[in-house]
Amino acid sequence: MKTKVQNISTFIGCHTNYEKSNLVLFGIPFDGTTSFRPGTRFAMQAIRSDSYGLESYSPYLDMDLEEQNIFDGGDLELALGNTEKVLQTIENFTVELLDDQKKFLMVGGEHLVSLPTIKATFEKYPNLHVIHIDAHTDLREDYLGEKLSHASVMRRCHEFLGDDRIFQFGIRSGLKEEFEWAKKHTHLEKFTLKTLPEVVAQLSNMPVYITIDLDVLDPGVFPGTGTPEPGGITYRELLQAIGTLQSLKHIVAADIVELSPQYDPSGASTAAACKTIREMLLILSK
Amino acid sequence: MKTKVQNISTFIGCHTNYEKSNLVLFGIPFDGTTSFRPGTRFAMQAIRSDSYGLESYSPYLDMDLEEQNIFDGGDLELALGNTEKVLQTIENFTVELLDDQKKFLMVGGEHLVSLPTIKATFEKYPNLHVIHIDAHTDLREDYLGEKLSHASVMRRCHEFLGDDRIFQFGIRSGLKEEFEWAKKHTHLEKFTLKTLPEVVAQLSNMPVYITIDLDVLDPGVFPGTGTPEPGGITYRELLQAIGTLQSLKHIVAADIVELSPQYDPSGASTAAACKTIREMLLILSK
Amino acid sequence: MKTKVQNISTFIGCHTNYEKSNLVLFGIPFDGTTSFRPGTRFAMQAIRSDSYGLESYSPYLDMDLEEQNIFDGGDLELALGNTEKVLQTIENFTVELLDDQKKFLMVGGEHLVSLPTIKATFEKYPNLHVIHIDAHTDLREDYLGEKLSHASVMRRCHEFLGDDRIFQFGIRSGLKEEFEWAKKHTHLEKFTLKTLPEVVAQLSNMPVYITIDLDVLDPGVFPGTGTPEPGGITYRELLQAIGTLQSLKHIVAADIVELSPQYDPSGASTAAACKTIREMLLILSK
Amino acid sequence: MKTKVQNISTFIGCHTNYEKSNLVLFGIPFDGTTSFRPGTRFAMQAIRSDSYGLESYSPYLDMDLEEQNIFDGGDLELALGNTEKVLQTIENFTVELLDDQKKFLMVGGEHLVSLPTIKATFEKYPNLHVIHIDAHTDLREDYLGEKLSHASVMRRCHEFLGDDRIFQFGIRSGLKEEFEWAKKHTHLEKFTLKTLPEVVAQLSNMPVYITIDLDVLDPGVFPGTGTPEPGGITYRELLQAIGTLQSLKHIVAADIVELSPQYDPSGASTAAACKTIREMLLILSK
Amino acid sequence: MKTKVQNISTFIGCHTNYEKSNLVLFGIPFDGTTSFRPGTRFAMQAIRSDSYGLESYSPYLDMDLEEQNIFDGGDLELALGNTEKVLQTIENFTVELLDDQKKFLMVGGEHLVSLPTIKATFEKYPNLHVIHIDAHTDLREDYLGEKLSHASVMRRCHEFLGDDRIFQFGIRSGLKEEFEWAKKHTHLEKFTLKTLPEVVAQLSNMPVYITIDLDVLDPGVFPGTGTPEPGGITYRELLQAIGTLQSLKHIVAADIVELSPQYDPSGASTAAACKTIREMLLILSK
Amino acid sequence: MKTKVQNISTFIGCHTNYEKSNLVLFGIPFDGTTSFRPGTRFAMQAIRSDSYGLESYSPYLDMDLEEQNIFDGGDLELALGNTEKVLQTIENFTVELLDDQKKFLMVGGEHLVSLPTIKATFEKYPNLHVIHIDAHTDLREDYLGEKLSHASVMRRCHEFLGDDRIFQFGIRSGLKEEFEWAKKHTHLEKFTLKTLPEVVAQLSNMPVYITIDLDVLDPGVFPGTGTPEPGGITYRELLQAIGTLQSLKHIVAADIVELSPQYDPSGASTAAACKTIREMLLILSK
């Protein structure tokens, strides 16, 4: 019989096998330190399924996913309840990818999962710079005594990256001390992305990791997240920013985090995640 | 007894009877070719009910539905599962309306239902031009082998309208070949409505049919649709466009399609549809 | 690298490949004639995903899916809007399965999809008997003039099966004429399943096809369906019925239809479908 | 043109006009004293629409709504915020119906709306007895000082009906003093409906008003209500009770209250209300 | 034992006791005249709980709630069904607050609850001016004969405030006569807030009461309200307006009304309310 | 001013202060090891709020919460992501309660939180017996390598309790090896609670801890849980079981776990939890 096995599910347009691919998409269904409303563990499953409501062709970039060599590596299987072990598993996996000379786009999960992927990337590219687009500073020293928290992820990254390596945009929420701390240790633009072009110009030849917390979007367009923060950017502004990021010559990896699809049953938030993934996969494929 | 029968339900302000009306509102609860997420069949019922959360007076146009002569003709009753038969029924109904010298505003249903209403209108007005406001090109040759699909409706219309009759605005999704095809056969503006004023000026004396796929709106303001596509226009931009359309001297008919109310239980999407219907009814009444 | 591809999704415990399997599970995501509330197209995707909230072991039957040889063949890809073509595609697929000497469990989709699978099975087993567990008679001559409707599926099956081959249980809704018609042509038990043991005894050596419309369950336990009909059976009664069905020596195929998962976001209805599938797969494996 | 006006909406099978009808169905969309969760104002609109998911034929009673003479009188239009005025409007309307020799089935709204309909019925039938099926005693002297409350409706009815006229079944919630008070003034059966047959036998020649608060049903089968109270009766038990009520020779009116459809988006609760209305309309038509 | 009682719930950062506070936050869970969709009674409970998803620090104003002296006084307990009594209770409570020299921020509830708080404030400050930010005129003479309605609240306030005291912004819905009436009696800006800076300049030394109906926001960002009206302002525009209001030297009280949290289960609307409350509490604290 | 602080929220009828109470109610908002669908962290907040839809009087037990001395101690504040630390915190808290000679009813949270409360209770009462009512065995040796999992809680308890101390009822899901293991180490009744009376008789003079996983209920009546398992007990059967438990002379503590309120927005599941808490508080108060 010639029955096709239909039940392999990938993100639209990502069917290249691992060996032939130069870019790997994978998911990390982890929300174990989310204090307020969990659910980012469900993101990647919703994203794969709903990606078929999207086209693989981008009229913004005039590129098509079908013409790239992208492997969808599925999701990491993770034991819950033991955060350190989880982060180690992610880091090991990322090291393997980088050893195999793959670029990657990781999809969270909560923002803490960027810590091991940024760390592994930094180990390969010691001159790594991080562009961080988010509503929140994520610069807390700890959260209720826990150092490994999605509210602290950039602070933890700073511990190995050091000063002047983290560039934060769109930030509209945090403790007063986080904003104060940022003045000395990071580039932090409040509320908007206006300084992005000049930062991109400055980093154009550097190895760059891009981490996008989708809650930078206004909850009007992206309500499907754990901590909606009104007053965010529009989706057109995000598209424009991605257009700007194209000028970077050496994007080595990226991630997109904090979709909680169940808080937006309309699917609009998942659609926003899907479209952002498509655009980011395309600029990573250049 | 003087009991009033209360259970007649019309769109707010549309109580003129058929004979005295010069404008007819009607619904087509059909979503039979919707590939991704069905539900536009429920649009008109939700719209009639929620229209009472709106006022009949428009402060934008300084006009009131109560002062126009509009008949709400209810919904067509359609057999499901047999698309050709459905389209024929719609076309026959539309021919009758036009024979009776009525203008009309049809409310979908999925976008395929515009095919028979545009066709019937074209038969009466061979010089018909179509203004098409949408997120999607709708120019596919076919969808999984089916020529009658909501992804192909404008391509099917082109078969009888011919070149230079279709004007597309706000388009931000489609296959690469659809965008290529459009370059030769239609006016297609990507992403925005900026060229609308000049097109309106050009068509000001022509018979014009306006078809609005509400998914042109950003999913932030209009999540209640089958295929949300981020990066759309704001509701204010749509209001402005409708203001621009007022300059057309000969709008003969219009439609508003693709609300799926169940994907937005907040009612905001249905409210957007209601308000658009009110504004379009008012400019059709001029 | 030793990356596992995680994104193959099957029903829990169904990983045998096609060649080694003797039982095939597959889905038909079709709801094209559903008159009232569509959505059964989403059933199989929800079922595969939520099956992992279940165990593969049944304490009722003391059997484990992991110890059977079951292939999950994915879902048929179907063109929408053309019902006849869809049914032909399903029939062709089913014939192939039967030619390869496989038993099967089909998961709908609306009930009309049982027509081609029962027809194909009947062609192989001319002495086929059908056990039909449902809230509705499904014996309409037509629905709004359409003969191919989920309200007519058993009437269409009768056209080739003939009298005394259809055994209906749990029926609590239909036209008066359907109940009258059934008196002459089928075994129909209203409201309950009390006569199932005697029918099973009578059919114990016959080739039997079992079609379960899950709306036979009370909407309290199974609200996720297009036309909830209060007063149905409890889930324990369904489990007991499946226990009774074990005595049949020659079940050749079965189906489970009419889950619309989106009407029950709690997941309880999908869980009921999953558990029913597990139990039916196990008795088909005997 | 022969356009049919389709947008008259009635409950299924209730198209007789007022003059020819002997039974009137009408709705009271009032929830103004609901303390916990409002929403019964939306019941009748949902019921009319969803009644088309039901058949007009009852296999339980072997009767068909289409063969009765029932008028659907729509909903009363009521000013909110002034409870006394609302109740007076309802009472006046009910008096008119009774003066015209109509039986009626009223659909709430919250339970307080039974006060004016029972009062008007009592004025015509001074020997009136009331069968009250409910989860709650509804016998409070007042609620936060307000005497007109849905928690007090039966206590208010007792003020004109007097002792030994109210028969309460299925009651499983109330203040201790309400249960104590009931011992002296009403027949109150806790938890179940076991004494219904004997009460029906006793009242078989009396004029009887039946008031059914649907929250008597277990929240499993009827979650769509303001104050779900676990441990209620099954839908089959309610059907059996309605079967028992058939023996009453002189049912003069009835009501069905407390559906809040928005708390059960699956539609199962609305379906339960629709089916109960169908059965009650049929026994009122005898 | 040193068990802390944790189940006191206040808005984030509002733990000062009554005596030491100079600003009081309180809620009025009343929606008794809401004609279309009730639910504002649930606003304050959702707001208190979800405020912990927000930070107490505002990067817009560079101020922190924790450093102010704010008392969260809970919610008024109100009898439903008797609107006059409710309004009197609110007025009495407000008079007490003002007698104790407290400023206050009241959170509704429907807009009618602003009537008694504005009235009490006017009695203390006869030169009171009201800034009214809203989608709706709220200037109806009555609604279905009822003078006490949320659609009439500003008209009722005008009865004691008189001409040239009410300044309305963002208005995009109303009867034609309301807009006409406003031309003579209030300052009314349609659609936008452009004239706010000049009005603020004009009122900078006056006692001012600010009433914000959150439905002034576009339903895209604030779907959680009874009557969503498309075409509203963005959240950034509201933030800018609050920034402008800082220049007022004598804001004596304010309110924020018309959140119905259950219409937006994503929590985005509640988050918008929370953030607006934080910003308003901070400018009231100056 | 005499403003009452209204924003203390307790479970209905539980206002006694700690010192005077002999029974303490408290919540543990922890779901950190929940593998499938999290959300039990939201249970206690929903329960406190919705308990006011219930009466404090039980007509089943003829007892009133208002007449008992119960303290609602709020919820433990827990750091997420570090399970061992969380369990230690819970154990320490429980030891304090027991040292103060309090009985307690703990409300989860996922089932793993019963481990530290049972352990602390066992340390005070070495002869402790545990009655475990649940859909799942909870006897896994580990889950994906983690020993601290809600699927392993009873296995972990067995490590200190030993054989013949755990009595399991209603179990209908687990691995085959769990059922096998139980045959040697616990009393396990599959599917029903029929042996509960004899076990109660046997334990009547023993110190007993009762742990109720609410998913023992059929998902029809209790869909609000992470892993709905069809075929469960009815709410009436649970009420009957609680009635049976009354005969135990020495219930020292109890817990009720696994409500995830967000999966059942109707509130029916939360109502089931509230009523179960009321009944359990009353029998603990005897």
Image: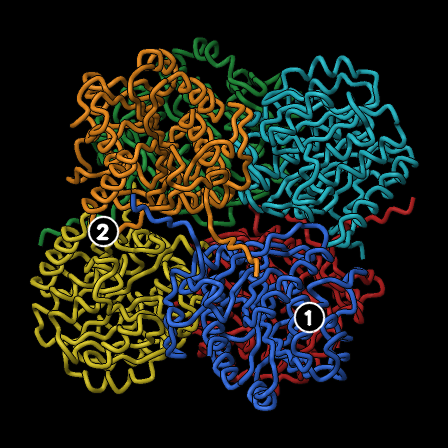
Chain colours: A green, B orange, C yellow, D blue, E cyan, F red
Q: Chain of mark 1?
A: D
Q: Position of residue C32 (x, y in %)?
A: 25, 52
Q: Position of residue B120 (x, y in %)?
A: 23, 33
Report the front residue among C204 and C69.
Answer: C204
Relative horizontal placement of residue A44, taking residue D110 as reference (left or right): left
Is D168 above or below relative to A57? Answer: below
Query: What is the number of the mark on residue B81?
Result: 2
Is B199 above or below relative to F56? Answer: above
Residue D226: name its quadrant: bottom right
For the point 59% across and 30% down, which residue is it? E173
Q: Are marks 2 and 1 in contact (CB under 8 Å)?
A: no
Q: Which type of secondary structure does the marked residue at label 1 adopt?
A: helix
Q: Position of residue F6 (x, y in %)?
A: 79, 50
For the point 30% across and 44% down, which residue is it? B31
Residue A132 in view of the camera: no
Is D247 above or below relative to D99? Answer: below
Q: Position of residue A148 (x, y in %)?
A: 56, 38
Going by the numbered disc 2, the residue's amino acid type is Gly
Report the front residue among B87 and F231.
Answer: B87
Residue D214: name its quadrant: bottom right
Going by the numbered disc 1, the residue's amino acid type is Lys
Q: Chain of mark 2?
A: B
For the point 17% across and 37% down, which residue is it? B147
From the image, state whether disc 2 or disc 1 is nearer to you: 1
Relative horizontal placement of residue F10, taking residue B134 as reference (left or right): right
In whole angstroms, how far apart are the C-alphas of marks 2 and 1? 51 Å
Residue at mark 1: D119
Where's the C terminus of chain F, which quadrant?
bottom right
